[in-house]
Amino acid sequence: MKLNTPILVFIATFILVHGFLTGWLPIPLVVDLDVIAREYMPIAYTYVNDSFDECIYDVSVIRGATGTIVAVEYWFHWGYDGFEIMDDWEPVIVYVKDGATAVAHRVHYQWRIKTTGIILEGNRPVIVFAPLWHTPLNTYPTEGYVKASYVCVKGVPPEDIDPSEIYYGEPSPQLWLKNTILSLAIAGIASTLTYIALSIRRVVI
């Protein structure tokens, strides 16, 4: 059976482009994940004289329902929790796909996820830590809070959590249709260019 090269190019291009846009094809990201972690590091507010003393982050990539998502875990440390001397690590996860698409924070060990109305300063989510018990919330700071000046460094999280089990992207039929149409258009262009190139080659030969 004679192979039709333009058709093969069309099929291969569609699979690659659609797989990349929707996330089901494991194409590696060509991006510095540490740059993303620094770019979306939360703007943190703490109560006066109640600031954290350490911040570490870890980055992972999720093949989610809406494509590839970068998840950055930020862990903030205090040496006390309420009136008890102990290690208190408070996690905040920022999910990045064309900007901060979701922010997850833990309230009494229950994860809460915010996907709309995320409060930002620039492109960085705002996180306000409650006094003493340090519950993180994506909200506006009130009187008595000050902006924390801090550096977050890459490290090993104190707890082993899987960001993809907390949030993996909201399924969107509209986005899927948009990505499919775009993939068909790109595949059509690639197939047409291949056909033209082969036709020119035959004429030259």
Image (cartoon, helix red, strand yellow):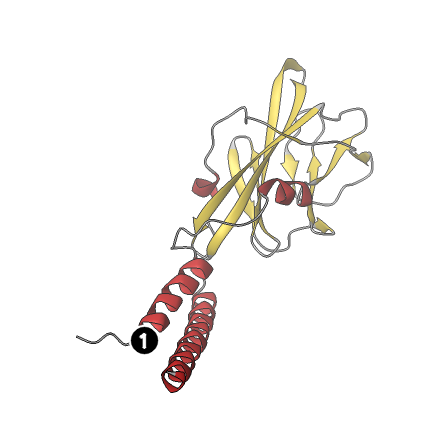
Question: Left or right of 51: which side holds 9?
Answer: left
Among the 4 quarters of the image, the one containing residue 16: bottom left
x, y percentage for residue 184? 41, 74
Packing grade of label 1 (10 A; few <14, some 14-19, many >=20) is some
The residue sitting at 69% across, 51% down in the picture is: 123
Residue sitting farthest toward the top: 85
| Quadrant in the rendering for residue 135 | top right
Q: Position of residue 203 (x, y in %)?
A: 39, 87
Residue 57: in sight, yes or no?
Answer: yes
Tell me the kind of residue under disc 1: Ile
Which image quadrant: the C terminus? bottom left
Q: Residue furthest left?
A: 1
Specify the farthest residue to the front: 205
- Can residue 171 be seen at all in this image of the molecule? no
Mark count = 1
Q: Is residue 21 above or below residue 150?
A: below
Query: Residue at left 46%, top 46%?
Result: 62
Q: Quadrant of residue 132?
A: top right
**Compared with residue 158, is residue 105 higher up or lower down, i.e. above or below?**
below
Q: Position of residue 19 (x, y in %)?
A: 40, 60
Where does label 1 land, which residue?
Answer: 7
The foreground one among 59 and 175 is 59
Does 18 sit left or right of 29 as displayed? left
Residue drawn at point x = 39 percent, y = 67 percent? 13
Q: Secondary structure at mark 1?
A: helix
Q: Name the residue nearer the viewer: 139 or 104.
A: 104
Taking the spot 39% from the left edge, 80% from the top edge, the residue there is 201
In-front residue for pair 202/48? 202
Task: Relative to 187, say whether 53 is above or below.
Answer: above
